Image (cartoon, rainbow, N blue to C red):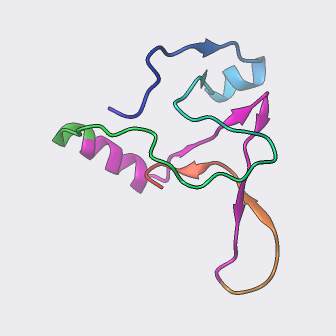
Amino acid sequence: NYCKPPKILNTGENLGEVLRGDRIENSVYTFEMLEDQPCRVGCRVKVIAESAKNFREKINDEYRANMILDNLPVAVLRQRRDGIQSTTYEHGFRVGF
């Protein structure tokens, strides 16, 4: 039980994506090129105990979801915690964050 668009549309994958087990689907999120966006709530759902347990397991296993836009990865700017100035980008994001 998670945020889903009213209708899930699957997109055809290339051979490499199929072999990796990737599945490309639409989402509730929208992106605009070269435009910073603040955090926004995608949806609100009631979570039952079994779904919460399953979700927690995914978080503990560091399951990651990756987003693509126009067949390119969506990059998330990352700041280092040690104070060193450098620009890096997160590869996917941990479920639950």
Q: For residue 67: magenta?
A: yes
Quadrant into which the N terminus falls = top left
Q: Residue at coordinates 75% horizontally, 59% vertically from top-left?
A: 89
Instruction: Count every numbered label the image shows and give the total.
Output: 0
In the picture, residue 25 is in which quadrant?
top right
Q: Residue at coordinates 81% horizontally, 47% vertically from top-left?
A: 34
* Above or below, comparing residue 88 to residue 60 in the picture: below
* Above or below, comparing residue 57 to residue 17 in the picture: below
What stretch of residues is rendered in magenta? 52-81
Q: Position of residue 77 (x, y in %)?
A: 72, 61
From the viewer's perspective, tell me whether residue 9 is left or right of residue 61: right
From the viewer's perspective, tell me whether residue 5 is left or right of residue 50: right
From the viewer's perspective, tell me whether residue 34 is left or right of residue 96: right
Q: Along the line of sight, which residue is nearer the eye, 10 or 44?
A: 44
Q: Position of residue 38 (x, y in %)?
A: 59, 55
From the viewer's perspective, tell me whether residue 78 is left or right of residue 71: left
Q: For residue 29: magenta?
A: no
Q: Position of residue 2 (x, y in %)?
A: 37, 34
Q: Residue at coordinates 42% horizontally, 52% vertically from top-left?
A: 59
Q: Position of residue 37 (x, y in %)?
A: 65, 51
